[in-house]
């Protein structure tokens, strides 16, 4: 697995450092699913993404928003979400539930 820091040049969501955006983020490329996007636009589809928000309420609001959008537009696929403090862990729905749980265990430990 490889991690890539999200910067304003490669942020797939254009949220890093912006008002109401996350303050830091990393993508974890998981070889079990590969990274379908070009290298300059990586994201949760590569495996997992950890977003750091100003506070827990902001992280939870982001998770809730993404869940609503994906529920209304199922063609976007699925994701697993875990909020711990100001961190939001997003794991690609391409991974099995047990694989996603392994990411969650690392975050909450």
Image (spheres, rainbow, N blue to C red):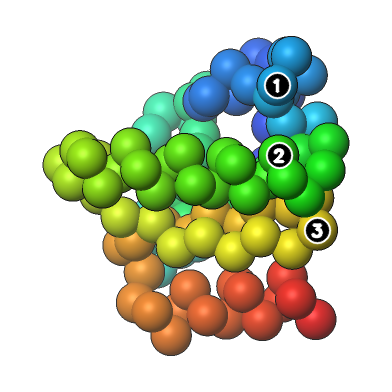
Q: CA distance from mark 1 to mark 3?
A: 17 Å
Kind of element beneath mark 1: loop
Numbered label attached to residue 20:
1
Quadrant of residue 6 within the rendered picture: top right
Residue 37 location, x and y as percent? 38, 34
Q: Is residue 17 above or below residue 90?
A: above
Residue 40 location, x and y as percent? 52, 23
Which residue lies most toward the bottom here? 98
Q: Residue at image x 22%, y 40%?
A: 72
Residue 93 location, x and y as percent? 34, 61
Numbered label attached to residue 58:
2
Left or right of 20, for residue 55: right
Name the one closer to the observer, 49 or 38.
Answer: 49
Q: CA distance from mark 1 to mark 2?
A: 8 Å
- Callout 1 environment at 10 Å: few (<14), some (14 to 19), or many (20+)? few
Q: Are marks 1 and 2 in contact (CB under 8 Å)?
A: yes
- First in residue order: circle 1 vs circle 3: 1
Q: Residue at image x 74%, y 14%?
A: 19
Q: Is residue 97 above or below residue 23?
A: below
- First in residue order: circle 1 vs circle 2: 1
Q: Which residue is labeled 3 in the image?
A: 85
Q: Residue at image x 45%, y 63%?
A: 80
Q: Is residue 80 above or below residue 58?
A: below
Q: Are marks 2 and 3 in contact (CB under 8 Å)?
A: no
Q: Are marks 1 and 3 in contact (CB under 8 Å)?
A: no
């Amino acid at each position: 697995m490889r991690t890539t820091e999200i910067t304003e040049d490669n942020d797939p969501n254009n949220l890093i450092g912006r008002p109401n955006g996350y303050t830091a983020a990393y993508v974890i490329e998981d070889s079990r699913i590969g990274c379908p996007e070009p290298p300059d636009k990586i994201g949760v589809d590569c495996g997992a993404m950890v977003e750091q928000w100003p506070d827990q309420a902001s992280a939870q609001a982001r998770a809730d928003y993404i869940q609503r959008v994906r529920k209304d537009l199922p063609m976007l696929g699925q994701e697993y979400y875990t909020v711990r403090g100001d961190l939001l862990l997003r794991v690609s729905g391409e991974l099995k539930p047990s694989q996603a749980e392994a990411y969650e265990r690392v975050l909450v430990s």
